[in-house]
Image (tube, rainbow, N blue to C red):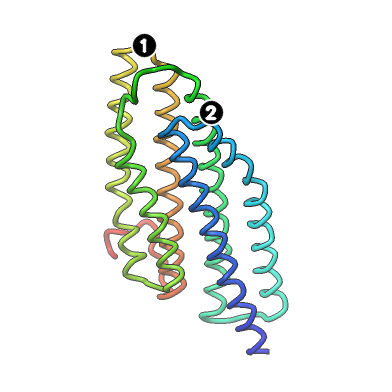
Amino acid sequence: MAVHLQTEIEKLKKRITLYGGMIEKNLGDAIRSIQARDADLARQVLGVDDQADQWEVDTEEECLKILALHQPVAVDLRFIIAVLKINNDLERIGDEAVNIAERSLRVSPLALPGDPVDFAPLCRLVQEALRSSLDALVRLDAPLAHKVCHSDDAIDEMVHNLFVRLKDEIKKHPDQADQLIEYLRVSRHLERIADHATNIAEDVIYMIEGSIVRHRHEAI
């Protein structure tokens, strides 16, 4: 029984890693689509969403099957619980990537000169948070997961600053309000993605250390 359980756990670890890679790529494509106003790339992101959703459902079913058939305990049980939660966060990140792609489709036809704000630094931080949380999962790297948790405040501050800047731009250029409002929404989508990346990092910490660190990053 123990050998079969470990085989199933290794398969589950590979599955959640592949799913994370799929979501990370989709997010990168969504971000590039809005930065370049690339409608074709945005539609590509929308086109793979059903596949990503099915992957999430299949992964959850695998977790439930292992719980029912093998009744794992201790570290193995913590791993499966963490994968269930991470699986859900990855699906939510995929949804936010789709939301960004939809904003891109709305922005791309607008013939406006340049972008009112520079989204690149925020995009880099958010993508790095997701990448690091997934790396922490693959390598079972608790210090890296803690680092992701600490990065959340910096991302929140950057989102706030962008929000203030965009509101000012709307007041100055009401004729560009449609585009600027879409960018406001993109900033919120990026903030939520960072929150989900933090959730993944917290679940990695739980998986490795058995401790729940939500709401107490200052104690990490």
**In terms of depth relative to the viewer, which is nearer, 131 or 64?**
131
| Label 2 – label 1 distance at C-alpha | 21 Å
Mark 2, secondary structure of its residue: helix
Mark 1, secondary structure of its residue: helix
Rendered residue at 58%/63% (across/down): 84
Q: Residues within 10 Å of mark 2 (few under 14, many from 20)?
A: many
What label does residue 214 carry, if any?
none
Percent from the top left, x then y, of residue 124?
A: 34, 47
Quarter occupied by residue 22:
bottom right
Q: In this rendering, is residue 49 above or below 70?
A: above
Residue type pointed to by label 1: Pro
Quadrant, the N terminus = bottom right
Residue type pointed to by label 2: Leu
**In terms of depth relative to the viewer, which is nearer, 200 or 182?**
182
Rendered residue at 52%/36% (across/down): 101
Rendered residue at 27%/59% (across/down): 218
Quadrant, the C terminus = bottom left
**In terms of depth relative to the viewer, which is nearer, 53 or 29?**
29
Location of mark 1 (residue): 174
Quarter occupied by residue 56:
bottom right
Quarter occupied by residue 64:
bottom right
Q: In this rendering, is residue 217 above or below 33?
A: below
Location of mark 2 (residue): 105
**In terms of depth relative to the viewer, which is nearer, 200 or 129?**
129
Percent from the top left, x then y, of residue 62?
A: 68, 68
Percent from the top left, x then y, of residue 217?
A: 31, 59
Query: Do callouts 2 and 1 mark residues in contact (Cβ within 8 Å)?
Result: no
Rendered residue at 41%/71% (across/down): 211
